[in-house]
């Protein structure tokens, strides 16, 4: 396995629509998935789409760590997973703001509106169907990674630039507000 180079915002590979994976079980696809898993863990991240490692194919890897699952019934921890040739269905009209960052845009994050519940389908490397209805952080991660397959970065979904900035500055601002918001 290998740590792959991550494309950063500005690279054309991140702005294109990706091609379907013709053979999910092909040795080169299995190798790509294994390398992407290793790269995601090393980064460290919770998701990584193929175009982020300079491969314009419709697949991504992701995980939902226990500390990130919100405890909603459909938001449970999930180990390293792959989704090949995914489809995505937004369930309902509810949108929730949540903080997102991206391995292709290091050091920044923003509050992005996303559907609170989704259904996704695809296959794994063995061609087995994968279908889940999920909510919370799990839904957010899948929507973020799915966007990469269509050349969409989270920065293109920012609706309030007052909620966009460098991690260190946003953390300092939150710490400064915390004492003022503490109950008396």
Image (cartoon, grey):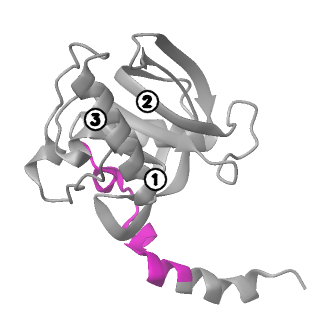
In the displayed image of the protein, which residue is found farthest to the top? 128
Dot 2 corresponds to which residue? Answer: 82
The verdict on residue 166 being magenta is yes
Q: Residue 65 carries which label?
A: none
Residue at the image point whose x is 43% and y is 45% from the top: 47
Residue at the image point whose x is 53% and y is 15% from the top: 131
Q: Position of residue 136 (x, y in %)?
A: 62, 41
The verdict on residue 107 being magenta is no
Q: Position of residue 100 (x, y in %)?
A: 46, 57
Q: Which mark is residue 32?
A: 3
Secondary structure beneath dot 3 equals helix
Dominant secondary-structure state across the stretch colored magenta: helix
Alpha carbon distance from label 1 to label 2: 14 Å
**Which quarter of the rendered picture does the N terminus lie within?**
top left
Relative to 16, 102 lies left or right: right
Dot 1 corresponds to which residue? Answer: 41
Q: Is residue 32 visible?
A: yes
Displayed quadrant of residue 161: bottom left
In the displayed image of the protein, which residue is found farthest to the left? 12
Marked residue nearer the N-terminal end (2 or 3): 3
Q: Position of residue 132 (x, y in %)?
A: 57, 20
């Amino acid at each position: 396995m290998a740590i792959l180079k991550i494309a950063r915002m500005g690279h054309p590979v991140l702005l294109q629509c990706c091609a379907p994976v013709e053979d999910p079980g092909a040795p080169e696809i299995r190798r790509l998935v294994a390398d992407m898993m290793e790269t995601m863990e090393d980064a460290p991240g919770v998701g990584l789409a193929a175009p982020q490692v300079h491969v314009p194919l419709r697949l991504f890897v992701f995980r939902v760590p226990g500390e990130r699952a919100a405890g909603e019934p459909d938001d449970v921890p999930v180990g390293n997973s792959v989704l090949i040739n995914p489809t995505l269905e937004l369930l309902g009209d509810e949108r929730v703001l949540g903080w997102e960052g991206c391995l292709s845009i290091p050091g920044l994050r923003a509050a992005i509106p996303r559907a609170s519940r989704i259904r996704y389908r695809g296959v794994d490397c063995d061609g087995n169907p994968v279908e889940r209805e999920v909510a919370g952080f799990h839904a957010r991660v899948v929507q973020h990674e799915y966007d990469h397959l269509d050349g969409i970065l989270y920065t293109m979904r920012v609706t309030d630039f007052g909620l966009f900035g460098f991690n260190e500055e946003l953390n300092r601002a939150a710490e400064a507000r915390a004492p003022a918001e503490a109950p008396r």
